[in-house]
Image (cartoon, rainbow, N blue to C red):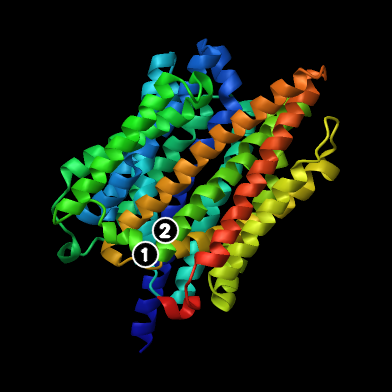
Amino acid sequence: MTQFKSSNENIDNKKWLALLVLCMGTLMIVLDSTIVNVALPSIRTDLGFSQTSLAWVVNAYLLTFGGFLLLGGRLGDIYGPKKLFLIGIIFFTIASFICGMANSQLFLIIARSIQGFGGAIVSAVSLSLTMSLFKEPEERAKAMGLFGFVAAGGGSIGVLLGGILTGVLNWHWIFLVNVPIGILVTILSIILLPQSDKSKIHTHLDIFGAITITSANILAVYAIVNGNQDGWLSLTTISLLIFAILLMCIFFLIEHKITSPLVPLRLFALRNLVSANFIGILWAASLFAWFFISALYLQLVLGYKPLQVGLSFLPANIIMGAFSIGISAKLVLKYGIKAPLVVGLLLASLGLLLYTRSPVNGNYIVDVLPSMIILGFGGGIAFNPILLAAMNDVSQNESGLASGIVNTSFMMGGAIGLAVLASIASLITTSSLQHHVTSVIAINNGYHAAFLFGSLFALIGAMIGFFFINIPKFSKSI
């Protein structure tokens, strides 16, 4: 009996260690979506980017990241999530080293696109691996809470870490810091992550479906991230969006016809999966309002340095971590998925709404900290239930695909949200300048409008959760 108990304890310990490894890998990827933004001015000065070409430091990553999420998830289902996780981490780590050593614009942009490819694969399968590690409801809720904190809080941690590394060292270290972590994650993954059950793995890959959906995603992301620069009604933007929609239609036609589709269309009949992905799009859009617009407010309106901007997010990170890791799981087990999801999104909406009153001579304690605290609570409560709702109705052999779908929703939501918010802020700023106000006031007015729309995104997400998420008490649903 003692030997059996000891064996179970060893298995449990290994599971939680494996989760920490998955979280470390995921954190690397999530950090990279925001850590770069604080360092962009330094990168521009050092490598001689123009304002237009500088956008490609971000866009090159977004294109491959958004393009390969869905395919990466399905490849995990076909060939095993552990194998794909390792491939993604190795690609990401090597590309991070190249980024850190880059001494030219082209070198950095190519390496960033490789980073995005590796990041897409890791993001697509890590959630699936987490679900497969933890079968018991209580354990799964706790595990998803920790994973949710990394996925949601990693963006604000990226702002903090980016400010510290850029301020204390230089921009190269925002990439080089990934190298030792990536090596460690690779070694530990080989040891700790479970092998896939080969009997449950399909060997057929829908090649044409993979090509069409990946191409459609890449074209859509390209059109969205360049919409502000090229113009939303420009021939380039409209043509790209039309081609993306056309490819998407071809993709659905292919999936309808073949026997082993990349994405079985019956998944779109799963109410909770579809609802959770719509919520994910809106949630990501509101998160980007927080991470990016508030960072711009602190830098361009209040005159904060990168390190100060990073430290400003620390209270929210602490609160979000405390709720995600411990309290969120208890809330889900006690009240189910819907109530925490709705309450968390409502709190996020309130936090962003408070930002709309931030003045040009704002004080951190009075005008920034209350929003940070409320957003920390909202993010800590909401993100775990969103992930659980998205993954609740799918079978284990399709969990990688579901993970890829929800990650694509988050990514697209962030890209669309940032593009919309930037357009709104720019429009209001231009309009304010025509009324002969100072440039700082005009910029701040634009940010207020962006925060208002970010708040609306979270509010609409809460409404969708309230009316459309339909999951029994968590303890009975798995």
- Counting other residues with Cα less than 10 Å from the Cα at mark 1, is it few (<14), some (14-19), or many (20 or more)? some
Q: Image check: 302 left or right of 44?
A: right
Q: Residue at x 62, y 35 (%)?
A: 292
The quadrant where residue 368 appears: top right
Q: Amino acid at mark 2?
A: Val
For residue 37, say whether it is visible: yes
Q: Is residue 74 above or below residue 231?
A: below
Q: Is residue 15 above or below residue 279?
A: below
* Residue 270: mark in rendering: 1
Alpha carbons under labels 2 and 1: distance apart? 6 Å
Q: Amino acid at mark 1?
A: Leu
In the rendered image, residue 52, in percent from the top left (x then y), is placed at 51, 15
In the rendered image, residue 233, in percent from the top left (x then y), is placed at 48, 24
For residue 261, say whether it is visible: no
In the rendered image, residue 335, in percent from the top left (x then y), is placed at 58, 76
Numbered disc 1: secondary structure: loop
Q: Kindly identify which residue carries mark 2.
A: 274
- Counting other residues with Cα less than 10 Å from the Cα at mark 2, is it few (<14), some (14-19), or many (20 or more)? some
- Discs 2, 1 touching: Cβ within 8 Å: yes
- 446 or 410, which is in the foreground? 446
* Residue 360: mark in rendering: none
